[in-house]
Image (cartoon, rainbow, N blue to C red):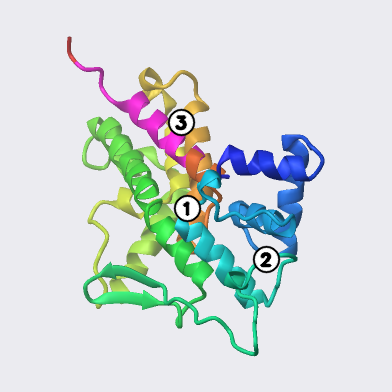
Amino acid sequence: MTLSITLRNKIREKLGRVSNQTLYVSIRKKAREQHTTDHDLALLLIAIDLDIDVRKRQFNVPPYKLELLENHIQQSHRIPVGSPPEWGQVTRGKKRKQKTHLLSFSSDLQIVDNLLPEQLLNEAEKMARVYPMTYVFENSVRNYVRGKLEKYGPNWFDLKSNNKIKQKVRERIEKEKKNKWHGKRNLHPIFYTDMEELATVIAANYSDFADDFPNPNWATSKIEEVTMSRNAIAHHNPLEQDDIDRLRVNLRDWIKQISSPMAT
């Protein structure tokens, strides 16, 4: 969760000074009930149920989170107890005019909320900042593996990969050849491997990488953790903040571990 501890403490107080663990259980329950993966949104919904004005400056809720909350309330036709009309409540037979959300990727590609719900646009905006981390991690693993194994000559990939990986790579290359209209990845087969296959290559040839890692499982465990987040993003699913934080730590650890020490 990214929301302030001040807001969380206020909610805990309203709930009878419950523990952080009990609050987290309530948040997960609310998230399931409201069909959302955003725990911040679930926390805000709990606050609204408790008649807490989350717009107060002391709670420091980001504006885009407030917009997400308002949109969720409007879409679910949910009128919280004690909430003001600004939270989507219908008054005198008229609905408050919704603010148009604009998500701009470039000067010639802009998305507005009549194409996607506000929540999905907010998630897209958030994930656009996360994707570069998985891109850098995955390609740095490829570059690292290639740099370590090229000493075996131009056919190092065939020598150091198992038959299953080589077969998968051949299938991907052949499929790509049939789609001539689309740009190609790269001439080298390493760019047709996925994260799990890269982990297999490292594990199978660990003696070539041993000097860089504290133990045989270090690299593969990092790759496995990042792969989970990478696959979620690749299938256009949002990550929770805990997963984003973990991804950032894994990328930082990986970079530190494989980087050559600076000369003194």
The residue at 39%/48% (across/down) is: 134
The residue at 28%/75% (across/down) is: 109
Q: Which mark is residue 213?
A: none
Do the residues under discs 3 and 1 have CB atoms within 8 angstroms?
Answer: no
Q: Which mark is residue 83?
A: 2
Location of mark 1 (residue): 62
Dominant SS of magenta comes to helix
| Residue 2 visible within the image | no
Do the residues under discs 2 and 3 have CB atoms within 8 angstroms?
Answer: no
The residue at the far top in this view is 264
**Image height of 174 relative to 148, above or below:** below
Q: Amino acid at mark 2?
A: Ser
Q: Nearer the viewer, residue 189 or 235?
A: 235
Location of mark 3 (residue): 219
Q: Give the quarter of the figure containing the N terminus.
A: top right
Q: Position of residue 127 (x, y in %)?
A: 43, 57
Mark 2 vs mark 1: give the one in front.
2
